[in-house]
Amino acid sequence: MAGVVSSHAGPQGTWVTADREERLPGVLATALAGGGYGVELHLVTEVVPLLPLADRVRSRVERAAASAGLADVLGPVDITIEDVVTPNEVSKR
Amino acid sequence: MAEETAPARETTRARRGGHGGEEEAGATSALKSERGTTAINDLVVTKVAAIAARETRGVHDLGGGAARAFGAVTERVGVGMSDERSRGVSVEVGEREAAVDLTLVIEYGESIPQVTEAVRENVIKRIEGITGLSVAEVNIVVNDLHFPGDDTPEESRVN
């Protein structure tokens, strides 16, 4: 997604969801007491306006959940911008 | 040699930490809505402030003498322990406000009041534009002046 460089697994690499086939760094899904799941995303982004970018990411997650038939169980999507990188740093990655 | 300039606005210092108890490095500021929370790590605000200061005309470098010397050593050794982009910048981030402290080296010949005011305006513009946080104050310490010949090594007196 434009503006998002990568996800961020955290200083100790603990922000990870282990799927059966792959690990998803920077993604956490937590079962909520009232039912459904809250999603937490930890992101590294470009130096762009961050609040609109977070809203676009949130909307995309909501659309993806809806298209997978999971709209009813999707709770809040919490987004943390952990770091920003300049275009030079992006090209070095 | 340091000169401290007045803060941009007379406001209360930003409260520390968006989430309860997160007052150490890596704390975040949060903007809540029904669809979820958006949080921005302190490191992000620090880097944006450093980038904004560096892109201002008349600013040679950021950081105090010791920090710059240490940065030069780690760079030469190839150990990237300190992030050069955040050197000379300290921030406090609250839920909706940020306060920034900068230490600058300014090019000799430039007007210190004009450069610091330009830095202050650019830092406020960038932080508010990129993070959505309101900037309560930008405090600037001019730590040193850079002279044009400072970077060229002295010629050896012997062949």
Image (spheres, helix red, strand yellow):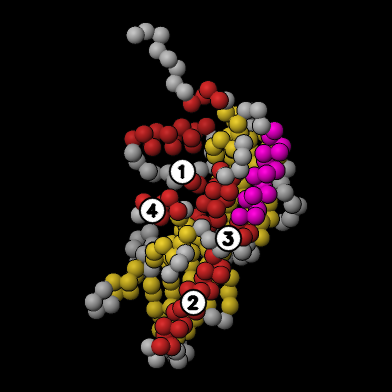
Which chain contains the residue that carries disc 4?
A
Separation (CA) of disc 1 from disc 4: 18 Å
Compared with B1, B138 (above or below) is: below
Which chain contains the residue that carries disc 1?
B
Q: Is residue A61 magenta?
A: no
Separation (CA) of disc 4 from disc 3: 21 Å
Q: Earlier along the polypeptide chain: callout 1 or callout 3?
A: 1
For the residues beneath circles 2 and 4, the answer to whether they share a chain is yes
Separation (CA) of disc 2 from disc 4: 26 Å
Give the residue number, with chain letter if any, for mark 1: B84
Q: Nearer the viewer, residue A47 or A70?
A: A47
Three-letter amino acid code of the residue under disc 1 = Glu
Give the residue number, with chain letter if any, for mark 4: A91
Percent x, y of residue A2: 45, 67
Give the residue number, with chain letter if any, for mark 2: A58
For the residues beneath circles 1 and 2, the answer to whether they share a chain is no
How dense is the environment of label 4, judged by Cα within 10 Å: few (below 14), some, or many (20 and up)?
few
Which chain contains the residue that carries disc 2?
A
Compared with B57, A47 (above or below) is: below
Badge 2 marks a residue whose secondary structure is: helix
- The span picked out in magenta is B111-126
- Residue at 61 percent of width and 46 percent of height: B101
